[in-house]
Image: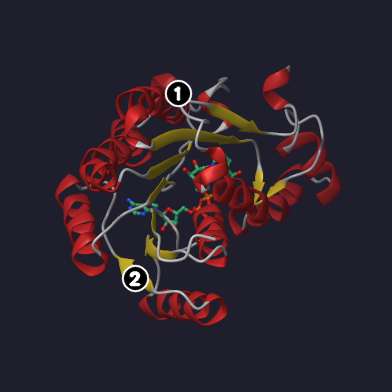
Amino acid sequence: RMSGKVAVITGSTSGIGLGIARALAGAGAHVVLNGFGAAKEIDRIRSDIAVEFGVRTFYAAADMMQPAAIEQMINDVLQEFGRIDVLVNNAGIQHVAPLEAFPVDKWNAIVAINLSSAFHTIRLALPAMRQNGFGRIINVASAHGLVASPFKAAYVAAKHGIIGLTKVAALEAAEGGITCNAICPGYVYTPLVEAQIDGQARAHGISRDQVIRDVLLAQQPNKRFATVEEIGALSVFLASEAAASITGIALPVDGGWTAH
Ligand code: NAD
């Protein structure tokens, strides 16, 4: 159990981040939520987690594009809870375009949110973790942190980058009871993916099953989406005492994609 521990999960108002937040709360951790969304919806997510799991919840509105906002978020968390035990860098966006036409502002935004934000949260959270002699840093990378696909220059570059950052943080913090690991999902079933299925089915004039098998999961040999609950359960394990010797890894959760 993680009772009394505090977990910060960036980009946790939806999808994988929310799944990780719920799983960590289910294990007894107080959770700090972050990400965009309607105030009412975020309030509902907060109170659902607090009621269901009997933990404290806190919301930080920080935009992961803004280093000053990230610093404010970490300061607010330390003010509120006095500690950070688990840091999950999950916020991320995607943009798909050929290199010659890749919008420069999209490149900058993806590098800022998917990579640089983790540099800032890690550098700012490490002192508190070192003070406690315990820390778990989990970076949500992607199969695209290990292999490339065309038209995803910024995303693939940022995800490869965060795996490099993961290794450096692991080495620097190794003697402090602090681990840093990257999770590399293939396709995970989220509302965003669900929305793509119907859209692609219409666009290609094929069935939902064909879209899942031949378009979305073309690279994923097991032909099944991972679930946010699976990523959550893995995060709970990596955050546990049992995972004390696991550090600096980039763990594929991709149904065999990167075994190709
Ligand atoms: P999502 O769009 O459902 O959630 C993204 C979260 O990040 C949301 O809470 C959003 O509000 C937040 N966010 C976006 N920009 C932000 C910003 N500037 N500042 C703060 N928060 C911001 O996406 P998801 O599918 O759950 O993806 C989460 C992470 O998992 C991303 O890093 C993504 O690259 C990675 N990933 C997803 C999949 C997949 O199949 N869904 C696969 C591999 C990796």
Which residue is identified by label 2? 58
Pointer 1 residue: 160
At which x and y percent is residue 174?
36, 28
Q: Examine the rendered structure and indicate whether residue 168 appears above or below residue 123.
A: above
Asked if the residue at tag 1 contacts the one at tag 2, i.e. Cβ–Cβ closer than 8 Å, the answer is no
Q: Nearer the viewer, residue 176 or 40?
A: 176
Taking 178 as reference, is 245 left or right?
right
Q: Position of residue 198 (x, y in %)?
A: 72, 55
Q: Earlier in the sequence, mark 2 or mark 1?
A: 2
Name the residue at 34% across, 70% down.
Answer: 58
* 24 over 151 or under it: above or below: below
Mark 2 nearby-residue class (10 Å; few <14, some 14–19, many ≥20) = some
The residue mark sitting in front, 2 or 1, is 2
Q: Amino acid at mark 1?
A: His
Foreground residue among 58 and 54: 54
- In which quadrant will I find the N terminus? bottom right
Q: Position of residue 45 (x, y in %)?
A: 48, 74
Residue shown at 50%/47% (left/top)? Answer: 239
